[in-house]
Image: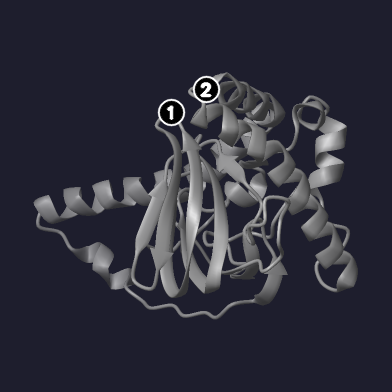
């Protein structure tokens, strides 16, 4: 049974991103387009400027980002962070641990999405650091943009068929992982909400004894400059915060 004894408030995931400076096929510098199946993600912009491009039933949006702005997107929303100049973001992710357990799916072309082995090979990085990791992360980004651009153009033309087909393909890819995700959800977000219910019941009964367990925690990033989906990623590899990425 998974145990996450000290999650961040709300059992959220936490990381910091600096958007990739690599130019893609459409002349835009930025990250790898992808969606999450069960997690809402929030960008809190701490510096620079840029945008997040999104695809959803609302169509295509280009949401400007600058220091102090906040943008968030719900499950199923394809998002692509693009660089406008020294863009830096703190990411808050619902359901800590699920994105790292495979909740995110890249917008690779349909033939790659249809083959789980090809998808896994294209999504994985051969190393965590160094030139080989950088080359693989850039190749992965370019493949995701290759699949993203036709989805975007179809939505712009009023055709949501390719976007819906991508959602279906993403759901098929992750279906076998949902039992493991359920364990992480039960140990983190659900357990956190249940503790709040128990605390409210105790207060209602006039019994604040649970406060005897009050304490404080602190930490710092345990990995700097990793290759994330959207950019260089500072992360906290701690239970209930951000688990080590499983990119395949």
What's the residue at 55%, 35% (across, down)? 37
Tell me how far mark 1 sits from mark 2, CA to CA: 7 Å
Residue 160: mark? 2
**Label 1 vs 2, first from the N-terminus:** 1
Picture coordinates of residue 185, whole percent (x, y): 50, 43
Classify residue 85 by image quadrant: bottom right
Picture coordinates of residue 184, whole percent (x, y): 56, 45
Categorize mark 1 by other alpha carbons within 10 Å: few (<14), some (14-19), many (20+): few
Q: Secondary structure at mark 1?
A: loop
Picture coordinates of residue 237, whole percent (x, y): 63, 67
For the N terminus, the quadrant is top right
| Residue where numbered disc 1 is placed | 57
What's the residue at 42%, 63% (across, down)? 65
Q: Is residue 10 visible?
A: no
Categorize mark 2 by other alpha carbons within 10 Å: few (<14), some (14-19), many (20+): some
User: Disc 1 vs disc 2: Cβ atoms closer than 8 Å?
Assistant: yes
Tell me if 29 is positioned left or right of 189 in this view: right
Against 93, residue 6 (above or below) is below
């Amino acid at each position: 049974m998974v145990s996450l004894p000290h999650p961040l408030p709300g059992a959220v995931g936490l990381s910091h991103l600096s958007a990739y400076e690599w130019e893609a096929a459409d002349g835009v510098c930025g990250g790898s387009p992808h969606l999450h199946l069960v997690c809402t993600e929030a960008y809190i912009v701490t510096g620079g400027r840029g945008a997040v491009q999104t695809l959803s039933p609302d169509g295509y949006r280009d949401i400007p980002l600058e220091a102090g702005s906040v943008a968030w997107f719900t499950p199923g929303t394809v998002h692509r962070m693009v660089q406008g100049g020294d863009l830096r973001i703190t990411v808050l992710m619902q359901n800590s641990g699920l994105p790292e357990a495979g909740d995110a799916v890249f917008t690779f072309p349909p033939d790659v999405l249809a083959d789980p082995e090809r998808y896994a090979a294209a999504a994985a990085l051969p190393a965590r650091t160094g030139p080989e990791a950088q080359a693989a992360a850039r190749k992965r980004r370019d493949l995701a943009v290759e699949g993203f651009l036709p989805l975007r153009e179809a939505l712009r033309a009023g055709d949501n068929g390719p976007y819906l087909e991508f959602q279906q393909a993403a759901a098929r890819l992750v279906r076998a992982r949902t039992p493991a995700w359920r364990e992480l959800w039960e140990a983190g977000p659900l357990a956190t909400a249940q503790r709040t219910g128990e605390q409210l019941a105790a207060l209602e009964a006039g019994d604040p004894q649970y406060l005897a367990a009050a304490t404080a925690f602190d930490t710092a990033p345990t990995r700097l400059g990793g290759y994330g989906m959207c950019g260089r990623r500072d992360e906290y590899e701690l239970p209930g915060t951000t688990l080590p990425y499983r990119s395949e």
